[in-house]
Amino acid sequence: TSRRRVIYEGAAKIIYEGPEPGTVIQYFKDDASAFNNSKKAVIAGKGVLNNRISAHLMTRLETIGIPTHFLKSVNMREQLVRQLDMIPLSVVVRNIAAGPVCQRLGVKEGTILPRPVVEFYYKKAESGDALVNEDHIIAFNWLDPYELDELLAMAWRINDYLNGLFTGVGLRLVDFKLEFGRMHGEFGELYLFLADEISPDNCRLWDAQTGEKLDKDRFRHDLGGVIEAYQDVAKRLGLVPQTG
Ligand code: C5P
């Protein structure tokens, strides 16, 4: 659909060359994938909602001093973001046990963790993402020790802020995944930025009253009503007009 150069295409997004050096366009597709790409579908309208939700959350995080890649919204499916050297880690923050971690830790889904837990997954492992620890990160030089400290501090602050934000709209932030990238400064300094997206595709969000799942687990486990759930999250954040 475009003559622009594609820099990278993932399961749910395309990164195009940006209008200026140091920028790229992040395009949100309707494609969904789960279980290491073994389950796939197209969910009409998902990209529009995730674009909107992620733009909103990144903008809010900027206001508390979290550097993010987000620069501006371009249209319904696209945002202008900083071009970064991506760090090959998924950073997962958990407040409540859900998903595969329940089996790993022998806890029931919905168990509130005594304190939030940060996990790192190496994204370039041969078979899916591999759980790694801080020693792997330093040993393989994915981050230097200073950057690792900074990243962890950012992850905790993001969790604090988003917890409050979602609590305020009747949602429980069960867990979420972050990705970070580096920008090289004028004098060779390195800066870490929050990148990728924050949306119901990479968060677990439960209704605070009913426990209803309003995130990608609806797709993963064929619960139905995927787009309605994402719409509900957007609505609660004040991002789409109420209808009826
Ligand atoms: O699969 P797991 O339970 O470990 O995922 C924890 C959180 O991270 C979930 O909110 C999930 O949507 C997100 N995640 C993600 N991308 C991955 C793995 C997990 O967005 N590759």
Image (cartoon, grey):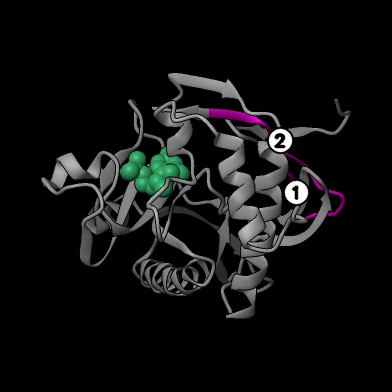
Task: Tell me the amino acid under the disc marked 1.
Answer: Val
Q: Is residue 83 visible?
A: no
57 in the magenta segment:
no
Task: Give the prevailing secondary structure in the magenta stretch.
Answer: strand
Q: Which residues are magenta?
A: 14-32
State the residue position of label 2: 45
Quarter of image, res 44 = top right
Taking the spot 66% from the left edge, 56% from the top edge, the residue there is 235
> Residue 79 in the image: x percent, y percent?
76, 51
Residue 198 versus residue 60 in the image, above or below = above
Instruction: Name which residue lies at 56% across and 69% down.
Output: 191
Residue situated in front as seen by the camera: 126 or 80: 80
Give the x, y percent position of residue 211.
37, 52
Which residue: 56% across, 54% down? Answer: 198
Dot 1 alpha-carbon crowd within 10 angstroms: few under 14, some 14 to 19, many 20 or more: many
Badge 2 density bin: few <14, some 14–19, many ≥20, Cα 10 Å? some
Counting residues from the N terminus, which is met first, the one under dot 2 or under dot 1? 1
Tell me the residue that label 1 is attached to. Answer: 24
Mark 1 residue element: strand
Q: What amino acid is labelled 2 in the image? A: Gly
Determine the quadrant in which ligand 1 lies. Answer: top left
The picture places residue 16, in percent across and down from the top left corner, at 76, 39
